[in-house]
Structures are given as structure tokens and as C-alpha cells.
Amino acid sequence: MKYTPRRPVTNVNVSPTRPLKDFTILAGGLLAIVIAVYLALGLAVDLIVPRLSVEIEKKIGAAFTGVLAETDGLTAAPPPLQKLVDRLQETCVLLPNPVSVHIQQADSINAAALPGGHMVVTTGLLARVTSENELAFVLAHELGHVSQRDHLRGLGRMLVLITASTALLGADNSINGMIGQSVMLTELSFSRRQESRADEFALETLFCHYGHVGAATAFFKKLPQESDPGRFGHYFASHPENRLRIDHLRRLAEQRGYPSGTPRPWPDGVIDTKNY
Amino acid sequence: MLDLIFFILLVALGYGAGTWAEKRHYRTIVEREQAMMNLPAVTLKSVDIPPEKIRSSRLVHGSAVISVDYFKRIVAMLRNIFGGKVTSYESLIDRARREAMLRMKAMADDAAIIVNVRIETAAIGKPSNRKSIGCLEAVAYGTALVVET
């Protein structure tokens, strides 16, 4: 047999590829799947949350507020504030379990509902309140979130996000760190629809409790226009969305014939904001 | 965020440097294969040369270790999820094998033929450790026969 030296014309062992195209297709496909799973789990959260029992909510809340109390320095609310929430709950807001109020020492103007019957109000918010009615509106707004279980929805979606990023990138990745740092209050931001439902809830509560809706939107309007929206931007009149919210509340009050009235004063120093 | 920037930088670096190194390597492989084409390396165990004409026979071997670049590794990892041909590693193995063959031929020097050639590949680095160095060794070995002219 004669041996003829020659080089092979084509290389059968290496497929002709476009590596960048390959990479784009694979990475894009993976990303699409992750997004689809995230959306699906988010939907699942929305389905599960209304069916959660109060006991489970309390358990979730216990884990959650414990961490918050440590990191953000929460203290129990003084009696006048707690009593106001209790009165609202007794008369107009029917919730399965009582809500306890906590104070957070912060200049930002903020209030948030947490799972398990907890509510956080910042000293910055309390310092700017002048009438009981406007404070009651803010508190009733948060009670609205509690009754709609919006906080659990927010928490559930956040957990889904953390789970997805952990499964994909490992436990110690930047997305988890990012969520972890701002996990507590910021991530409990709600959708526009949830906010407007809580607003409506607050307006009804105010009418039910006081017989009029005076000062309902006062709190939105009196905040300084240029002030820093902070982590929340929840109650700012300068925000265009909040102007819509004010208009919406006014229209609603007109439609339902809620009268306006003189708000009860909320004297300075009822809550000594310096000492918390 | 910083992690993500690092990741993208590494992928870009891996793609750039990896592609450049691969092209350069293939150029030298083709050149040397052309130059050493007259030294046959075959898998046959015996050849048609009268025994008295064979002056010497000795073991020759060549080995090459080629590393994967970051880009190829990521593409392979993605392939790992979806399945299919891991085309990004194909050129790697091809390069390692051909380089090993060329080194073996270089070792054979004045031989007329290399018989009983075998090629083996081995992964370097512990497979259990995910962060181990991803590279591949190819070893080619055979018996070089020096023939009287």
C-alpha cells in the first residue's frame, strides 16, 4: 500500500460556528426563561396571598419585624398614636388581628405596613403632622394595605426575586446584596392600583370615623415641594402621581357626597419625636 | 453591579484574547503540518520495511496543554443547560491533538515513519471543583523508525 502524504482539505472535527451568535441565543434564551419564571411565580404569589391564614402571616411577620427592629432601630409607638390606630380599628377598619404601631427614627416622611400586623411610622412624618385627621388618613392608608395584604404580595415577589437570583448566580451575588441592603422598607413599594385602593380605603375610613373627610389630602399638599423624596416618595405632593391621587380622592369624595369638616388638632409634643 | 461589569469585561477579554490566540495557533499548526508532511505518522503496527533496513526504533511522544478562555467556558456552561454540541470546545480539542502530533513528529527528528500512533486526551484540574482551571492535555505517542537509505 502506497502512503501519500497530504493535508485534509476540511477539518471535520471543528464545526463552523459563530460563537457570538451562539452566546447571544443561549444567554437570551436563559434570560427569557428566568423572566418567565419570575412572572409566573409573581402570579402564583398573587394567587396564594389572599388564601394565607392569619397565623402564617404572623409567623412571616415575626421573622420580618425582628430583623427590622434590629437594623432600623424600631421602638413601640407612644400611647396616643397606638390609641388612634386602635380607635380606627374598633370603629371602621375590620381586620382579623390588631395592628401595632412602631416608630422609626428617621427624617424621611414615611409609613409602611409590615406582615403580621405591624406598621412603621417615621418620626419625620410625625413631626410634620398638625391635625389628627391627616394622621388618621396616613394610618388608614397603611391599614388599607394591611387589609388588602399588599405587604405580603411585595414580600412574596421579593422572595421570588431573591430565590431566582440565588439559583442562577449563587448565594453570594450582587443582586442579593442589593436586595438585602434595601430589603426592608423600600422593596415594599406597591403598584399604582394598590396605592389608589388604599387611598380609597383611607377615605372611607376617615368618613366612617369622623363623619367628614376634612384634611384628607392635607398631608400630601403641605409637604415641601423641593424636599428629597427619600427612599419612598410615598406621600409627596410634588410628585405628579400624587397630584393625580389628590384629584382622585377629591372626585371620590364628591361622588359619594362625603362632607368636608374641621379637622381635630394634633398638638405638637403629643409625641416627643426627639426621644425616639 | 460591579460583579456584572467584571463578568462582562471577562467575557469580552476571553472572546478577544481567545479568538486571537486561536487564530494564531491555527496558523502555526497549518504551517508546521505542511512542513512535516513527509514524515508519516500511522496507526499501523507493522510496515513493509525489511527488518534489516531498520536502523533504530524508539518511542516518541508529544503533549500539549490548551486552556479554555472565559468566553468559551461561559458558552459551554450555557450549553450545559440546554444541551447540544459544545462547539466552543471543539476547536480546543482539535488544537491540542494536532499540536501534540506535531510535537511528536518534531521529537522523531530523522525518522522515516512513526508507527503505532495513539492519541489520548485528559482533562487537567479536579472536575469536582467548579473553579478549577479548565484545560485539556492531549498526548500523542508512537514508535519512530529510522530507516537506512
Image: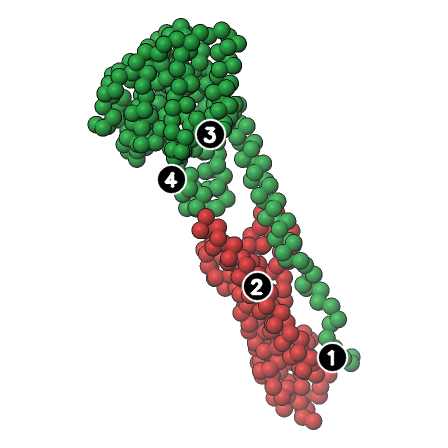
Q: Which residue is disc 3 drawn over?
A: A239
Q: Which residue is disc 4 drawn over?
A: A181
Q: Amino acid at mark 4?
A: Gln
Question: 10 Å neighbourhood of mark 2: few (<14), some, or many (≥20)?
Answer: few
Q: CA distance from mark 3 to mark 1?
A: 80 Å
- B55 to the left or right of A68: right
- A200 to the left or right of B45: left
Report helix, strand or loop for mark 3. loop
Mark 4 vs 2: CB contact within 8 A: no
Q: CA distance from mark 4 to mark 1?
A: 67 Å
Parent chain of label 1? A
Question: 10 Å neighbourhood of mark 4: few (<14), some, or many (≥20)?
Answer: few
Q: CA distance from mark 2 to mark 1?
A: 35 Å
Q: Earlier in the sequence, mark 4 or mark 1?
A: 1
Mark 2 vs 1: CB contact within 8 A: no
| Tag of residue A5 | 1
Instruction: Tell me, yes or no, whether dots 2 and 3 are on the same chain.
Output: no
Report helix, strand or loop for mark 4. helix
Rendered red, the chain in question is: B
Q: Earlier in the sequence, mark 3 or mark 1?
A: 1
Q: Quadrant of residue A121?
A: top left
Report helix, strand or loop for mark 1. loop
Q: Residue at x 32, y 21 (%)?
A: A129
